[in-house]
Image (cartoon, coloured by chain):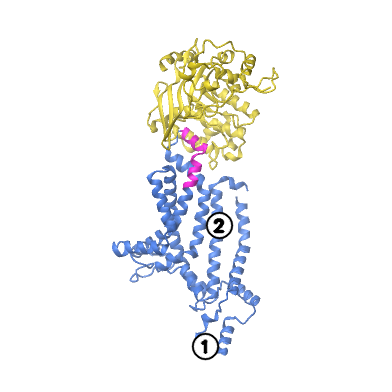
Chain colours: A yellow, B blue
Amino acid sequence: MSAQLSSARSGAIDKAGEPLLSIRGLRVGFRKAGSQFEAVRGIDLDVAKGEVVGIVGESGSGKSVGMLAALGLTSKNAVVTGSVRFKGDELVGKPAREMRRIRGARIAMIFQDPLSSLNPVMTVGAQIAEAVRLHQRLTHRQAMARAVELLALVAIPQPERRVSQYPHEFSGGMRQRAVIAMAVANDPDLLIADEPTTALDVTVQAQILAVLRSLQERLGLGLVLITHDLGVVAGHADRVAVVYSGRVVEQATVNQLFADPRHPYTRGLIASIPNLEESRERLFSIEGSPPALGRLPGGCAFHPRCIYAEARCREQDPPLLDVGGRFSACHFATSLPPFHSASLAPAVLETGSVAR
Amino acid sequence: MSRYILRRLIAMPFLVLGIVTIAFLITTVTKGDPLTAIVAEQQMSNPEVVAAAKARWGLDRPLPERYMIYLGNLMSGDLGTSFITKRNVGTDILYRLPATLELVFAAMIFGTTLGIVLGVLAAYFRNSLIDHGARLFALFGSSLPVFWSGLGLLFIFSVVLNWLPGPGRLDARLPLPPGVTGFLTIDSLLAGNLAVFKDALWHLLLPAFVLGWTVSGTISRLVRANMLDVMSREFVLTARAKGASEFRVVIVHALRNTMVPTLTVIGYSFAYLITGAVLTETIFSWPGMGSYAVEAARALDFPAIIGVTIVGGLAFLVTNLVTDILYVVANPRVRLS
């Protein structure tokens, strides 16, 4: 699979020369009480310098676990295989001590819930200063001054006062800004944002995304946006990887993906975005639910829910293949009928998944 | 923060009055006759002797009057005279309390340190040998009666191995250091007498460990459960994502978040042991509050019983206040309320 993907770089390279992050055949397995299951069954992904890559998938699809594994942040019972190269440096199997020098310094990661991702018993300033001092030789005073700067950078008003407050004195949006400030404290090359806006109000979501984007452009960050929200991806990503039950099933630029999705799962996702122009009585949804980990169907993991599935889909798991400068893991990637978001509904109607 | 503590301080005198009143009333509801402690048995049938004793101790006065007299005396620091020792109860307690405090402080140092370290290790290495070992240690600590573990350890370390001295606070051949704090270890250091210090410390070791063991069981289980909860929270992941070392993640980020419930148990255990270390004090011939309380109760020595109850109540009040202040330090969210 990775052989075909070597050309996957082309998508990332044409933006900035060489990929910042290059993931090949990443697999994450967990051993639990004797049984073993794979949460990630093969993620391939490139992120170029200054590029915004969206990773889209349902909860439990392995999109977060994959990125945590890339940073060595999975729990002790996880088995991580494959390759994660950051600026040419292999991260899988790197000693913990060396990983700590990269985490928070070169690659930063922020998480979903700003309510719980700050330590409730430390001031916001102390937590940002800690991030600074873990990687830079600064005095406490200098680090606190840097924390004030960083809070100002993420547009928190009165940063001098805010820096000595505790997380519970911040609103949800403010906390996420503080978390972002902490993440960019050491001018990282890459920022991985795991559902950064999911726990926030819609109005605040837009502000946080705006902060992330402006920082990304100003600092030239590579940005990985993990989300289940295609709207976020459409508005902010350059490229998208769609993940289904632990695998990347489609990878393309945002325009390619929305104009002409080459995987039935992607088509289902796009069709289920609410559309103001059409009045459907009921929102489209993909029939069925994602398979439970460790109980994957044979062949293509999506076939039980796929309206295009044929006999070979039950037997052969399709590899992620180049289909004209983009990638799809579907046997019928090149022969799927033309896609019109509106026209998918009747096609699906035949399967009875849209009730009128 | 200071207003919060001020409010607590204002409430203190009323709480103390409540404790005194209840302690005083407790003695009146017992069926026992305190005269049996004062008058010899063969004299109990002699009405003159009984009447004289009643008048001598004020037992012929009505209850409200006795209560007012007691309060009046208490104001001037007089806790009354013990029926048994015939000494002032305050003097008795001042002799006994430092012994208990020294023992309990040492026990809490053992218990808290052991409890927190074992709790953290057990949580971090969950389901490992360390976890199971810590669980067993806690189980024994909480469930082995002190008279069993105390005697067992005394037998092993004092009789068989002869590493540690037997019961008591100090070797009888050594001079008592001048009483400043009443803590033999501190007083001997103040007097510059290292031989006495060493002996007092060796005497303290075993009873403090036995008492601390019981406390460490509770603390380690509590710390373990809270650590497991806290370690699964997102800010721990954030700390790791920052590049913090595991030690830093566990101690600086996670452990601090478990301190509020832990402080509660530490405070409660401390206050409880001030009057509740009876068995340990008895086994190790430790002249402390617990054994004094038992002697007083057995003899229906009312002034002593009331005195001990007041001291025990005050111990709870003071430790609660200190715990509350420490809460504020440990958890900034308390400051709001």
Is residue A297 placed above or below A124 in the rendered structure? above
Is B160 magenta? The answer is: no
Residue at the left extreme of this rendering = B161
Is disc 2 in the same subunit as disc 1? yes
Q: Give the class, few, some or many, for how many residues have Cα within 10 Å of label 2's Cα (few <14, many ≥20).
A: some
Residue B109 image position (x, y, % from top left): 43, 55
Percent position of residue B152, x then y = 35, 62
Distance of label 2 from label 1 (alpha carbons): 47 Å
Q: Quadrant of residue B27?
A: bottom right
**Relative to B66, does residue A187 appear above or below in the rendering?**
above
Element under disc 1: helix
Q: Name the residue nearer the viewer: A112 or A122.
A: A112
Q: Badge 1 is on which residue?
A: B43
Residue at (63% x, 29% y) in the render: A204
In the rendered structure, which amino acid carries the disc numbered 2?
Asn
Residue linked to disc 2: B320
Callout 1: chain: B
The rendered magenta stretch, by its main secondary structure, is classed as helix
- The percent position of residue A182, horizontal first and vertical second, equals 52, 32
Chain of residue at mark 2: B
Instruction: State which region is magenta.
Output: B224-242
